[in-house]
Image: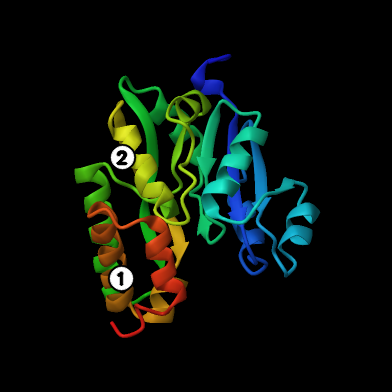
Amino acid sequence: MSQNIDAAKISIIIPTLNEAGNIKQAIATTQPSTNIEVIVVDGGSQDDTVAIAQSLGVKVISSSPGRASQMNAGAVAASGDILLFLHADTHLPTGFDDMVRAALQKAGTVAGAFALRIDASLLSLRWVEWGVNWRSHFWQMPYGDQAIFLTKEVFQQIGSFPELPIMEDFELMRRLKRIGEIVILPVPVVTSARRWLQKGVFKTTLINQIVIIAYLLGVSPEQIRSWYRQGKFRRI
């Protein structure tokens, strides 16, 4: 790296698509912090997402839609030695910048993420959080809503996010595990409960597990995405 990691610049990359209701608060949680930049990568929003982000003084770029494509475009535009990928409906904890730099200084660590808290009071979501955090620690398999971070050097070494329509974070973690340790910070990010509330906690969790099993059994990400679009999961 071009500088000591304890002073390295962090580029926070936020992929967006019609996130006008969330983007302001997501950006707000990146402050206060030291030596960071925020890059919003928009995939063609039809609402005020871009205007809101621009009004907050962050860098805004456009790319083809698709979370993997957008995050890769943000990484190319990033000037930091550390990349942190933040979903637009997820909020960073205070002091995240120092935590990230400290985590990446540990010998053998190639990437990291945060524990997860879901922004709703349902008891069933506490069980979801427990499952996510257990999986993250035991299997070293955090997902995208946990604010994955790593150095730009490592990101380029593993070939960036695979250009998949779904499961790009899962595949990235599988690649990273082959070359080193993924650390999970105990302080959580807070993510929106919207997807669990829309379909129900049990149904959403079940669908997530079906998708993972299908992917591991060799079903293509394109086929899995087509199931979503065709409403195959509505009967579950």
* Horizontal relation, residue 11 to residue 146: left or right: right
| Residue 19 position by quadrant | bottom right
Secondary structure under the numbered disc 1 in the rendered image: helix
Name the residue at 44% across, 77% down.
230
- Point out which mark residue 174 bears: 2
Closest to the observer: 172 or 127? 172
Q: Is residue 193 visible?
A: no
Q: Which comes before the other along the chain, label 1 or label 2?
A: 2
| Residue 24 position by quadrant | bottom right
The CA span between labels 1 and 2 is 21 Å
Closest to the observer: 208 or 38? 208
Measuring from the top left, give residue 156's x and y in whole percent: 50, 27
Tally the marks: 2
The C terminus - image quarter = bottom left
Specify the farthest residue to the left.
Answer: 138
Name the residue at 29% across, 61% down.
129
Q: Which kind of residue does numbered mark 2 sit on?
A: Arg
Measuring from the top left, give residue 114's x and y in whole percent: 38, 46
Name the residue at 69% across, 60% down.
44
Question: Looking at the picture, does residue 59 appear above or below residue 99?
Answer: below
Measuring from the top left, give residue 144's x and y in whole percent: 43, 51
